[in-house]
Image (cartoon, rainbow, N blue to C red):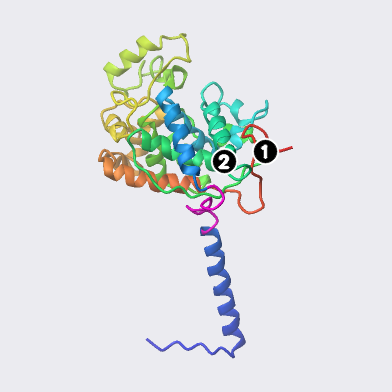
Amino acid sequence: MPELRLEMNDPNTVRVCLLVSIVLLSCFCVKSQLTTDFYSSTCPNLLKIVRKQVKDAIKRETRMAASLLRLHFHDCFVNGCDGSVLLDGSNGEKFAGPNLNSARGFEVVDSIKRAVESQCSGVVSCADILAIAARDSVLLSGGPTWKVLLGRRDGLVANQTGSNTNIPSPFDTLDTIINKFANVGLNTIDVVALSGAHTIGSARCVTFSNRLFNFSTADAVDPTLDSTMAADLQSLCPENGDGNKTTSLDRNSIDLFDSHYFTNLVNNKGLLSSDQILFSSDEALSITKAIVEKYTDSSTFFTDFVNSMINMGNINPLTGSNGEIRKNCRVVNS
């Protein structure tokens, strides 16, 4: 290989070096926007404050762990992780289809914010509170932990239309779900790993009853749904019954954050269509089925879930002078 020599008095060489320096500096800046120690001097007890509030909330209602985790997910997929899902108002994301009558935990976030403000007024964003609360919800449910990257600022506007179009639906095809993830910079591994969050929490009858009655011209019930489970669900959610009744997303492992969700998929016991298609759909054969099988091992699932949560938390955060630090997570500052 010939020796490469750069002559620093050559104008072309100087331009190349300057360009490389700018690129490297830009990469560094992007990666350093969020840091694990962002509040180390301005709010050193932040993590302890949030952990206590989340722990108390889960003690009162175990399901709250899943609700707080879901809020972070639904926040990041719309406008990026900017706390916009928390904003009140008729045009807010709370009233979008994916959140209406199902998104919950707002009062817990209010409690966390008050506790944080009492010690660190005007310092910590609601978007960062959501990210920390999501991590703590997973950990306190028996799942893995990770160092949360922090430094997000809060958005100034909600995006109800974005909520309706960007957030994956229980009725979406696998291709549609993968595309929605790709639109925010997440890949197929992230699709399956983050779907594993359904190892805790509940779903309403309206989100899966389409699998129980008049499924298709050929099948009354979704053939990829275990027959015993289908009968149980038909009893719980009769045709034309109360669509707001709920049942656990992870059958036989309700409140523990583990890999049982994936074992259920292998056994045709995924509750939502969007769950089961990860394993049973025609598209899954070449895209996600092998990942589901791999995640029946909890250590493998935990490793990828942590990475995917970090990836999701990095979706278009507001930093620097963008956005604001809301005093009240429900409204922008006056």
Q: Does the image show residue 202?
A: no
Q: Residue furthest right?
A: 334
Give amino acid for label 1. Val
Residue interval drawn in magenta: 32-43
Q: Horizontal and vertical percent for residue 106?
A: 55, 28
- Label 1 sits on residue: 157
> In this rendering, is residue 326 above or below 64?
below
Q: Nearer the viewer, residue 306 or 43?
A: 43
Q: Which mark is residue 119?
A: 2
- Mark 2 to mark 1: distance in Å? 27 Å
Quadrant of the snapshot with the N terminus: bottom left
Residue drawn at (28%, 29%) of the image: 264
Q: Nearer the viewer, residue 210 or 105?
A: 105
SS label for mark 1: loop
Give amino acid for label 2. Gln
Q: Horizontal and vertical percent for residue 308?
A: 41, 46
> Is mark 2 in CB contact (under 8 Å) with mark 1?
no
